[in-house]
């Protein structure tokens, strides 16, 4: 009789824990996230003025035009239409430091930057380890400022104002380093161009 009673107690405890951890807790987090942080809870997806999704502020996007600030090089390609990875994986190329392909890629990046009169900073040459980095440092943004201002035919001071607006400061004022969110900055530059027309 004790065995049956203990089995029933174990089943009851399992059901209660399952109810709490598999239903109540996830629903509580979902409701709290949607109520208090809807933008973040839905992937921090940005929309343009036509209400079309243009990307997430959490994931680095590839920009190739001179009119845009560029993020770190990445082996992973997001937001590239049919070329995008459907699995959403992240990661580096896994090339060893001794691999000639890695050295060739780094030298190609360095020569592109030198052609644009940009100091080849490490973050603009070396690929992101995760492939997700949406930020560049203020120094990397400053290196690209002249090229973007020339391509858009606007003053560097106008762009500096936007860089200051779209710089994410240190977390809790002590952790990490300030970084410029490239997607938000580039979209603000596009909006500024639309408003000037």
Image: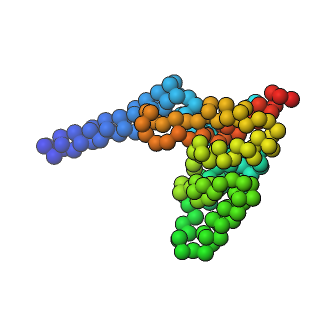
Q: Position of residue 158 (x, y in %)?
A: 72, 32
Q: Position of residue 141 (x, y in %)?
A: 64, 44
Seen in the picture, residue 34 relative to 81 is either above or below; the reply is above
Residue 45, quarter of the rendered image: top right
Q: Quadrant of the N terminus?
A: top left
Q: Position of residue 13 (x, y in %)?
A: 26, 38
Q: Nearer the viewer, residue 166 or 21?
A: 166
The residue at the point 58 percent across, 64 percent down is 93
The residue at the point 77 percent across, 31 percent down is 192
Name the residue at the left extreme.
2
Q: Nearer the viewer, residue 133 or 179?
A: 179
Residue 187, quarter of the rendered image: top right
How many marks the image carries: the answer is 0
Q: Is residue 193 visible?
A: yes
The residue at the point 60 percent across, 55 percent down is 121
Seen in the picture, residue 79 relative to 57 is either above or below; the reply is below
Q: Is residue 27 left or right of residue 181?
A: left
Q: Nearer the viewer, residue 41 or 175?
A: 175
Q: Position of residue 33 (x, y in %)?
A: 49, 30
Q: Quadrant of the C terminus?
A: top right
Q: Is residue 12 left or right of residue 135?
A: left
Q: Is residue 26 visible?
A: no
Q: Nearer the viewer, residue 104 or 161?
A: 161
The residue at the point 50 percent across, 25 percent down is 36
Seen in the picture, residue 79 relative to 154 is either above or below; the reply is below
Residue 42, quarter of the rendered image: top right
């Amino acid at each position: 009789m004790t065995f049956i009673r203990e089995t029933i107690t174990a089943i009851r405890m399992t059901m209660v824990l399952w109810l709490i951890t598999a239903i109540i807790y996830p629903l509580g987090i979902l409701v709290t996230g949607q109520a208090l942080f809807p933008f973040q809870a839905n992937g921090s997806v940005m929309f343009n003025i036509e209400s079309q999704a243009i990307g997430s502020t959490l994931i680095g996007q590839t920009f190739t035009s001179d009119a845009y600030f560029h993020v770190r090089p990445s082996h992973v390609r997001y937001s590239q239409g049919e070329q995008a990875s459907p699995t959403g994986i992240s990661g580096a190329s896994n090339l060893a430091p001794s691999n000639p392909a890695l050295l060739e890629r780094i030298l190609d990046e360095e020569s592109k930057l030198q052609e644009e009169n940009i100091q080849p900073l490490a973050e603009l040459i070396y690929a992101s380890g995760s492939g997700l980095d949406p930020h560049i440092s203020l120094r990397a943004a400053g290196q690209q400022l002249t090229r973007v201002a020339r391509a858009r035919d606007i003053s560097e001071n106008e762009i500096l104002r936007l860089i200051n607006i779209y710089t994410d400061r240190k977390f809790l004022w002590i952790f990490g380093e300030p970084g410029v969110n490239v997607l938000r900055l580039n979209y603000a530059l596009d909006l500024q161009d639309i408003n000037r027309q």
